[in-house]
Amino acid sequence: MASSSGRSESRRHGATSHSLSTTIPAIPSTSSNASLPPSPGAGTRRHVLSHINDIFKCTICFGRLEDPHLCPQCSKLYCYDCIGEWLDSGSSQSCPNCKITLQLEQLVKVRWFDDIQKLQQNLHTLSACDAEEEKQTERPPTGKGTENELCPMHGRVVNFYCSTCNQCICEVCATDVIEGRHRDHTFKTLHVTYEQHLSVLENELEKVEHYRDKLSLLQNKIERNVTLIGRVKSMKHKELEAIMLSAMESLDRQEEEKLMKLHAHQHSLLGQIDEIDQKLQTMRCEMMLCSKPQLIQMKPKIFAVCNAIRMNPIKDFKQIRLPARLKIEIPNLYETGVFVVHNFSTFDDNKVVYSNEFSDCFGRTWRIMAWCVIAEDHFGIYLELVNGTPCWMECTFQLIHYHPEKTISKTIRQYFDRTPQKGWGLRDFVTLKTILEEEYLQVNDSLELLYNIRPCSPTAEPSGVLDADESLSEQ
């Protein structure tokens, strides 16, 4: 199925297109002649660094690996939170790659991943140094400039850094044998020390930016959760048009409580993001405007600010997420919710995915099953009675689209017992070609199915009992 959609194919294979057999080329020696062009080692290191970044990505979120764990069967790497949410979602209890039955405790923690991160950091530092060397070869050395500060004691340009005293000094300070303030001290050239400190600070800022990106991802998930709850509310409003006003108020109250919690989390996240953006902008501006000695002196302060930002823990989305289901305590009302089918492009022929179990107004337990028959170009939706007495049920399924007018809705009325049979669902609910070509897939490669079910009587069907797979389309 994935071959029929380029967009889905790129999501499936984008993070696994490289081999772990990549080797790191030796770093060529630096020529002493400044007029020579830079060695090809810099470009090679940048290529290897990009190669490593592509390899070590989570194949679920396609982001940088966090606390990586691998499947014991196929050795595919996943973020621990991502594979945990995948297995806990109820839609699948298997590895997304090799489809082997998998439990969370069977995952293998990747303990050598820290060594890979150190290697990436070393390559990044080497590439930054090579880029600076290239700049130095392209521009002639300057004498005095606006960036150069003068030594307050000797009036000379400050061009050395005393590692022993942690001070920026001039050539006279370094060579003065009479006063001997820096006798037997360790010196470095100022521009080398400046570049080292700048690289360390940039690395700290990148960590803060990564922290900020995780906050943004969490905010986007909450936004989609809010959208789904709004969709369920809209369906419930249609159902409650002929029902007493008190039931409407009860539904609004339930929605308000859930949205209040979600909006509170959103407001807090947006506030944190704005505050981090302001601090990042301030620190970058100060680093840009200050001199080299001032930047070195500012390093502890910037470190403290970065550490203070990252010390704030990020909440797990599973702690914030609210079920997109609203209840009405009135008999014979619809049970409404959203069944999300994750990683649709990875489905194989005859792939079956179940929703979480839920109850109707009489306490019966149900679950929804999605089934792909690739050979026949069918995507089917079925309702299964898990626990409770057999009964007649009216079931409405909607395949949600970004454009409401393209939402596909079908209804059946059928007698359900504990024995699955041919007529307990919609085998040809929609074709796989329609799903892929009409853009029913969400950006995270999932389908969103809104369901509405309620007990009914055989006489509720005006045209008699529906045969297997026969449906009433509701436009």
Image (cartoon, helix red, strand yellow):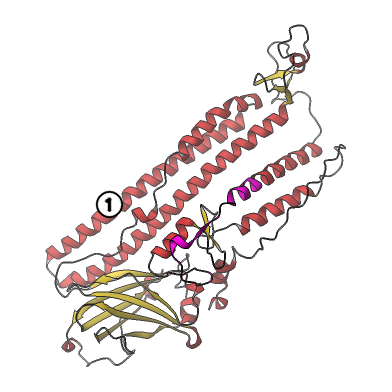
Determine whether 223 is above or below 89 in the image: above
Whether residue 374 can be seen here: yes
Residue 149, picture quadrant = top right
The residue under label 1 is 260
Taking the spot 49% from the left edge, 36% from the top edge, the residue there is 307
Taking the spot 70% from the left edge, 15% from the top edge, the residue there is 151
Q: Amino acid at mark 1?
A: Met
Q: Position of residue 464 (x, y in %)?
A: 22, 93
* SS label for mark 1: helix
Whether residue 475 can be seen here: no
Q: From the viewer's perspective, is 343 left or right of 465? A: right
Taking the spot 60% from the left edge, 39% from the top edge, the residue there is 202
**Dot 1 alpha-carbon crowd within 10 angstroms: few under 14, some 14 to 19, many 20 or more:** few
Q: Position of residue 336 (x, y in %)?
A: 26, 70
Q: Is residue 117 magenta?
A: yes
Q: Position of residue 190 (x, y in %)?
A: 71, 26
Which stretch is magenta? 93-120
Q: From the viewer's perspective, is 162 left or right of 103? A: right
Determine whether 144 is above or below 228 in the image: above
Q: Position of residue 248 (x, y in %)?
A: 17, 64
